[in-house]
Amino acid sequence: MDASFAATAAWATAADAADPLRALRDEFLIPSHAGSDGVYLCGNSLGLQPRGVRRVLDAELQSWAENAVEGHFKGTTPWLSYQATVRDGLTEVVGALPSEVVAMNTLGVNLHLLMASFYRPTRERPAILAEAGSFPTDRYALASQVRFHGFDPAEALIELEPDEPHGTLSLAAIERALDEHGARIALVLLPGVQYRTGQAFDLKAITALAHRHGCMVGFDLAHAVGNLPLALHDADVDFAVWCHYKYLNAGPGAVGGAFVHARHARADLPRLAGWWGNDEATRFLMRPEFQPTPGAEGWQISNPPIFALAPLRASLELFQRAGMPALVAKSRRLTGYLEWLVVTQLGDLLEVVTPPEPERRGAQLSLRVRAGRERGRALFDHLVAHGIVGDWREPDVIRVAPTPLYNRYADCLAFTHAVQAWSKH
């Protein structure tokens, strides 16, 4: 841990003043508590609203008012090509080629669409390798896809149990499972960050191990996108899906995102086709034959929801202004400070579930109250009542995420003081 940290207001104030990204906080609307800004540590669940959202939404509302259907072709951001307005920002965030990303649908829908192409089970190779205790979106999708293809999840869904303290999963355990079951596995589907523990997975290493056994590889990046330094193209991942309402700040229920590696751009893969996935050059000829757009856009089903994409544009402008390397650097130091405070100031009250290695986590720290679930829930309720917003995950985890776009060192210290105040009751 960094010996330069200090649990004082003077240290936190000085660290915030020296932060090169400090001005970005002013680009967000911070919920208030008792007449002043609250401490929002829940960007891992729902990101704050960028001030620019109203501007971009108003622009599209005005285009609708002035142009009606001609808005598809007129103005600075014609709706026909609106997806292109977020493409470059997404490629920078996820480390991809422009043709490999698309903003469409929602995470669960995209997972089913891409599994239709990349989970092709056979009698000899019917299985999916996943984590035990995965987020319900993934668990439900995987089990239903297995059943859809006529197999039994009890036999064809291989779920890895945690093998490390605090419920995390080692790369060695994944490798052992692939060595044992690889010949039966059609698809490996894992998270980029495990939602309950906050553990980050090594996408490149997992992909290499799975490909060695002939498996397709996909990732749910819901808690990783906009949080971790991703390099999906270089990691050789087959596909990935994610949402944009967490670290990407695109609003509740925001349109999701998907990645398909360039090597599959023109592959004759089975898919659930839709009109908007047809090549734009021939789309309006209304031919009966489906001619997919090369790349990830070929998996689109319907025309893009403009009012859902507009907030993503506003947020990505801030990501491009800051740059992912700078955001990751701040995130690691900010999360490191919060971890240091928990260990040194709150260690008798809380334990950190999330791995201590910076490369094995992002902004989120998952915490357990040592006195058990009942006391943990009491602490969580106390924090919310005092304007400290994190979130609770059953059975006993409090998640807090100092997000580098808008959180401060002072927020980490305020969280610490609130926990200390509760402990004296």
Image (tube, rainbow, N blue to C red):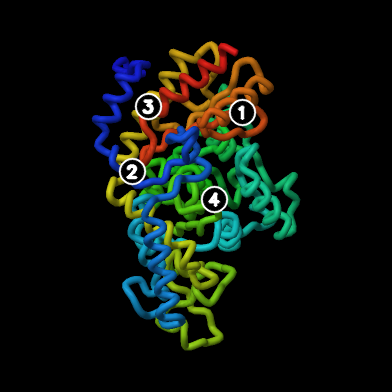
Q: Nearer the viewer, mark 4 or mark 3?
A: 3
Residue designated by label 1: 381
**Which corner quadrant of the image does residue 340 belong to?**
top left
CA–CA distance between discs 2 and 4? 46 Å
- In the picture, measured across the screen, residue 200 lies left or right of residue 425, that is left
* Marks 3,2: beta carbons within 8 A: no
Which secondary structure lies at badge 3? helix
Q: Which mark is residue 215?
A: 4
Q: Which one is nearer the viewer's eye here, 100 or 371? A: 371
Q: Answer above or below: position of 225 versus 354.
A: below
N-term mark: 1 or 4: 4
**Lower position in the chain sequence, tag 4 or tag 3:** 4
Question: Which amino acid type is shown beneath numbered disc 3?
Answer: Ala
Task: Look at label 1 and name its amino acid.
Answer: Asp
Query: For residue 228, what is the image quadrant?
Result: top left
Q: Are marks 2 and 4 in contact (CB under 8 Å)?
A: no
Q: Tell whether label 4 touches label 1 (CB within 8 Å).
A: no
- Mark-to-mark CA distance, 3 and 2: 15 Å
